[in-house]
Image (cartoon, grey):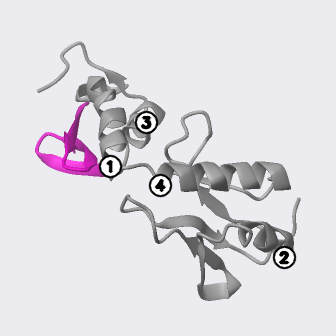
Amino acid sequence: MLTFEEKLSIIETFPELQRKDVSLGRVNFHYPDSVQEKKIVVQHLHPNGNGFVYAGHMRKKDTDRKGFINIRDYNEAELKELIQRSVDYLSEPPAEIEEEENEFARLEGAWIGPEKQELTLQKEDLLWNVYSGSNLEECFESPVEAERYLLDEGFRQSKKRKM
């Protein structure tokens, strides 16, 4: 496992990232040139070596609900690659992001839970919202996050799709 200082040193090789010291000795790194609302690439890098990198767009990685991956056990090459992929993604023009999200239109509609409860996933503006009836349950910045949430909660798509 890399130390806090080693991770800082690696992250600081990305000149496009700006360091922001936060509470408890933790450090965030922002990407101010992001074309998306998301600007934080590295979140809560802690002196104990723990920290997170934004990767909500990467389907093959396990991320938290906000799209971050824990980097505690990453080596130098893995950390560099993850940060570069995050910066690349946040640099994509909005038109490409919209095209990517259009491929996820199939996710919109009714989802049935393990106890036959029904939720509806709907894209609204830049968000993917999950509703229980007319009540908003959750909001997500990407369809990948929304789908992962629904599947993790035991929901499956209903035969009736879009509303």
| Sooner in the amino-acid sequence: mark 2 or mark 4 | 2
Q: Position of residue 66 (x, y in %)?
A: 47, 55
Characterize the local packing of mark 4: few (<14), some (14-19) or many (20 or more) Cα atoms within 10 angstroms: many
Residue 55, percent from left and from top: 56, 49
In this orientation, does residue 66 appear?
no
Residue ID for mark 4: 90
CA separation in Å, label 1 and label 4: 10 Å
> Dot 2: within a 10 Å radius of its alpha carbon, few (fewer than 14), some, or many (20 or more) residues?
few
Report the mark closest to the observer, 1 or 2: 1
* Residue identifier under label 2: 5
Q: Nearer the viewer, mark 4 or mark 3?
A: 4
| Three-letter residue code for mark 3 | Glu
Label disc, if present, on residue 94 of the rendered structure: 1
- The quarter of the rendered structure image containing the C terminus is top left
Residue 154 in sight here = yes
* Circle 1 SS class: helix
Q: Seen in the image, is 12 located left or right of residue 66?
A: right
In which quadrant of the rendered view does residue 51 lie? bottom right
> What amino acid type should be assigned to the residue bearing mark 2?
Glu
Magenta range: 118-138
Using the image, tell me which numbered label, if any, was put on residue 153: 3
Image point (30%, 40%), residue name: 98
SS class, disc 4: helix
The answer to which of marks 4 and 3 sits earlier in the sequence is 4
Mark 1 vs 2, N-terminal side: 2
For marks 2 and 4, give the CA distance. Answer: 25 Å
**Observer-nearest residue: 159 or 32?**
32
Q: Secondary structure at mark 3?
A: loop
Q: Quadrant of residue 9?
A: bottom right
Type of amino acid at the residue the image marks with label 1: Pro
